Image (cartoon, rainbow, N blue to C red):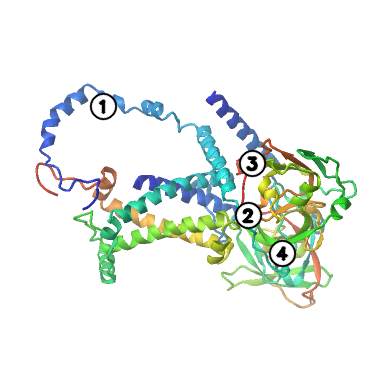
Amino acid sequence: MKSPFRPASPPDTAILDDHKPLVRSLERRGFVRGGLSLGALAMLTGCDVTRPEAVEAALLAISRFNDGVQALLFDSNKLAPTYPASMILRPPKFNAYYDVTNVQPVDGAGWRLEVSGLVANKRAWTLSDLQALPQRSIVIKHICVEGWSYIGGWTGVPLRAFLERVGADLRAKYVAFKTADDYPSSIDMASALHPQTLLALQYGGETLADPFGFPMRLRTAVKLGYKNPKWVTAIEVTNDYPGGYWESLGFPWFAGI
Amino acid sequence: MHWVNAVVMLIMITSGWGIYDDDVIIRGFHFSSFWRLGDWAAWSLNWHFAGMWFLVINGLIYLAYGFASGRFREKLLPIRPSEVVQTVIETLHFKIAHEDITVYNAVQKLLYIIVIFAGIAQVVTGIAIWKPVQFSGLVSLLGGFETARVLHFAGMAIIVGFLLVHVALALLVPKTLWAMIAGGPRLKARGQTK
Amino acid sequence: MASLRLMLVCGMLAVATAAHAQSKTPGGMPPPPGMSLAESTAMRFPQPVRVGDLVGRAVLRPVESQDVLGRVRRVVRDQNGRIMVVVEFGGFLGFGGRPIAVPVDAMVLLGQDMEIVAFTPEQLRQFPTFSPTGTTDVPADTIIKVGLAKPSH
């Protein structure tokens, strides 16, 4: 048995004979028993596992650490696989934090995209303003944190091009979104600048339908579905962590795929 | 190391069940809340993404030690098919007394090798479904995102199957339990060799 | 100070969890009593879908375990012109089911599948076996409108 943790030959158990009286006298004095109390253990570790908030705080701390790991793993030159347009699911799968009957359609004519934060040009955009910009189409796999996926096709303004146009500080950390359905969301700048991140105006070559974010939604190929807000009404470039709807409920923030 | 792995594996399995319920793979089959770690999906995910670090670090140390010390070669090889059949027959006849528990019989060797590979497969398929774009090559090798998900589930099923057999046999041969807690088989008293 | 921070995190989580429980509506709920199937579909932002793409789709129960109720066999118009989805109902792994006709307004699209939201499995079991007499097949390239729902977990 080559284990370094076990002696080559078993020890002569006779050595225990000399120890027995000593051990018995220690036990009588209660040293051993007293030292093994749970309270003593708790003080040693500084962590009370009987309080659930401490456990949740620890899990959230690890989740933030994972965000850092994901940022390191993110290769901005890596493109998500693309698919033929014939594979686009029509209509796509609907999801939100409420069922479809609560969708509040947005009036396209009256809609404005507000721009704020670390940008040079803070004027609001209309739908036709956005439609006039060069568009890009992507057919990619939407992956939901729940586990399901489908292949969808979106057309829109690359977010990078839009940020350059409004003179955004591209070294800022976050791009944050506000929506008409009170679903704040934000992504890291590196993902925002990725070529497969769009301000999408169309699905499957047709105008976005109401349940799928008309007039404009974020669509990125490098993040889970919940990082793609629908019915976007405002974009902010910032260095202050903006968080998001699901993140406030414990979900991870980076959520890269 | 064994007990760290046991706790971490249970964390991964039960939090994984919570994640599975969010979109079941086998339609009609889901895990009731009793079996899930995490009140709902967000916390199952957080447990899963926390436990994974401990699983991988502990697993890597175990693999490195096992190869470097020759322990794997010594305890897990060779496996002869005739020995496997013989041991299965003996086990089914409940002839499971195990004189020297530091020596593994053929079925043990096979099951331990299977569970080690299943554990490695879980890490590989897990990484694929965690980052299917960053590791899209790996995902293609596995047959696509949906297939990788199914493989991850299948690996879990293999490990759970192993655990049921492993725990049952340990309980049926109690001196193995003591050895796992104490670090080795119990020595006989007073100068006798084991 | 550490305990104060922990209390803030705990309080935030407690409030957020409560808010989450209030704002979240479960997916695929049946129409409220008194509402017609057509009205309930109208509330679900019905989307155009190609009839041929529906054939073969799994039909699920709107519950977490996503029980399979059956598969879409064909889509027909009944004598009154109503669109009915013929579902191979019950059975196991494709054997032993029987076709029943479910009004399309009782169903929703869920990604690559469909769900029956207006009838429970017990009610569906009472449906008569489908008979093609008096019905006409809807051609595969026809576009019909079907309501949506979010996943039901």
Is A22 located above or below residue B179 in the figure? above
Q: Secondary structure at mark 1?
A: helix
- Identity of the amino acid at label 2? Val
Tag 4 and tag 1, C-beta contact below 8 Å: no
CA separation in Å, label 2 and label 4? 23 Å
The residue under label 3 is A247
CA separation in Å, label 4 and label 3? 28 Å
Q: Chain of mark 1?
A: A
- Identity of the amino acid at label 3? Glu
Q: Chain of mark 4?
A: A
Tag 2 and tag 4, C-beta contact below 8 Å: no
Of tags 1 and 3, the one toward the viewer is: 3
Q: Residue furthest right?
A: A109
The residue under label 2 is C63
CA separation in Å, label 1 and label 3? 47 Å
Mark 4: give few (<14), some (14-19) or many (20+) Cα within 10 Å: some
The residue under label 4 is A89
